[in-house]
Image: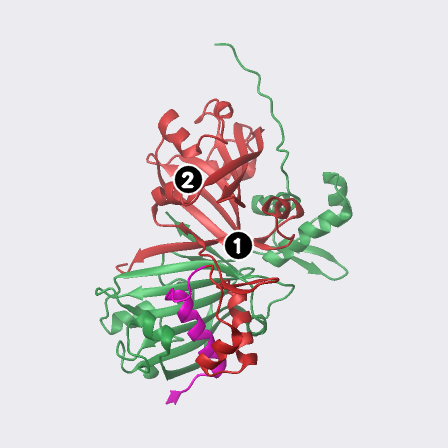
Amino acid sequence: MKKKKINYKSPIYIQLREVIRNRIEEGEYSPGTAIPSENSLAQIYGINRLTVRNAIDKLVKEGLLKRVHGKGVYVLGKKLESSINDIDGFNGCRKRSLLKSKILSSAFRSAGSKFSYLFGIPKGSKIYAVEALLSEDYIPVAYEKFFIPKKVIQNCDDIDFSIFSTKEIFDFYDIKINTVRQNLEIIIPSSKMTRVLQLKNNQAIMLKESFYYNNQGQIIYFEQSYIRSDMCQLTVNM
Amino acid sequence: MSETISSYDKALEELEYFIIANIYKKNSKLPAERKLCQELGISRTTLRAAINELVLRGLIVKKASSGTYVAPAKIKRNMLGVDSLSTAMREGGGIFKTIIIDQSVIQCNKQISRNLHITLGKKVYCTTRLRYIDGTPCIIETTYLDAEKCPDFDKFNLEKTSMYSIFKNIYNKKIVSGKEKISVTYLTKEEAKMFDTEENSPAFFAVGTTELDNHERLEYYKLILKYDMFKFTIKTSGEQ
């Protein structure tokens, strides 16, 4: 067999954003250290400074880099990881006490059309609504809203949802969860969410909605997590 | 303790209900503001605020001249099992058109080595494709393959043949598992041009690897997905 000569080309499609990302992942640019200046990056890759700045801006928004005024651009440590396969998601993190959960509000309220439809309960029946903020070192990571019909757990209002995960609570009450369906989307935060999550520079956030089904196929718990994508990334095993 | 919800939250939930229950069909125009205000018993200011919130959430779209519409359904990227990953999303679910942006042979670097479990310097096929669904460019997919596992990979026409059918039919390789990390990135000028959208728009950034039944790595890939066209979905068993 004739040996073919390998023609190694570098890919034509190179994005500086990806080049810097790769250097960070390879550990060539390590957390806590500054990356080369915009000028030297422009020189190394033969591109103009504006393009370099744009690439860095994107990675700052992503939460991989941090600009320190008058000093340079620094590499941040790893983001939090939350596994989608683990239905406890962030609660898993919470248990390892990485994240603090603060209940912002909790109360029974009546179901309008949306929750009556979701939970298959009459309009006006009571549901328990909780808003919570998850933070790491006082920096918000996610804002969560969740809803449980009163008929699923009568004494919802006595439970401390900042201590136990949903799964633990359902276990306590011997409520079987058959399946959990989760949707993940990217959304543009509202001004309220920008404030609550302390977002900067037009960052987008992830919205994860979780629907917990019982053995009869009814939804017994619904949760919305508004996740800061610069603080956290999601993993999935297939 | 019982709490009533604000008229804003009420408006939001009612509108959401109309959309999720499919009472307002996808792509259809919302009823006139006046009619909605009457129906929901809310002020115009409250209604507009609620509509704006749902625009941000991607449930409603505003069209410059003609008004407010229910957004088209997002394409579901199902994370349940590799089969659905390869077939439902990658090959089906709409008409796919593929354009090769770049196809090159490169030397395995640290990054690729770590993800494909092959030694540095080995020959790797790197393919970047722009993919269209129903005529809209919405996925930029870069795939790295070990040339030893996929000999002469560059001879295939990837604009006409799916990678998965090549893996399956030519190399006789069956993917059984995979791992993916999902985060948000912001489009570069070039990417935005490909998607026909604005620079710095958010996008899904999914990086993953796929494995064969003998636990060998097959692919290392990076996907950039137009954010307003996709949602990731997963169904898990409650028995854990």
**As shown in the figure, which amino acid type bears the numbered disc 1?**
Tyr
Determine whether the residue tagged by mark 1 lies in a helix, strand or loop.
helix
Pointer 1: what residue?
B227
Q: Is residue A27 visible?
A: yes
Looking at the image, which residue is at 64% across and 46% down?
B193
Give residue B28's position: percent from left, percent from top.
46, 62
Pick out the residue farthest to the bottom: B1
Q: In terms of depth relative to the viewer, which is nearer, B134 or B2?
A: B134
Q: How is the image coloured?
A: by chain
Q: Where A90 falls versus B231 (above or below)?
A: below
> Among the chains, which one is red?
B
Q: Is residue B22 magenta?
A: yes
Q: Residue at x 33, y 71 (%)?
A: A117
Residue that badge 2 annotates: B91
Q: Nearer the viewer, residue A217 or A74?
A: A217
The magenta-colored residue range is B1-26
Residue B115, percent from left and from top? 48, 39
Does the magenta run of residues contain B18?
Answer: yes
Q: Front-most of B9 and A17? A: B9
Tag 2 secondary structure = helix
The quarter of the rendered structure image containing the C terminus of chain B is bottom left
What is the C-alpha distance between the residues marked 1 and 2?
19 Å
Type of the residue with mark 2: Glu
Q: Earlier in the sequence, mark 1 or mark 2?
A: 2
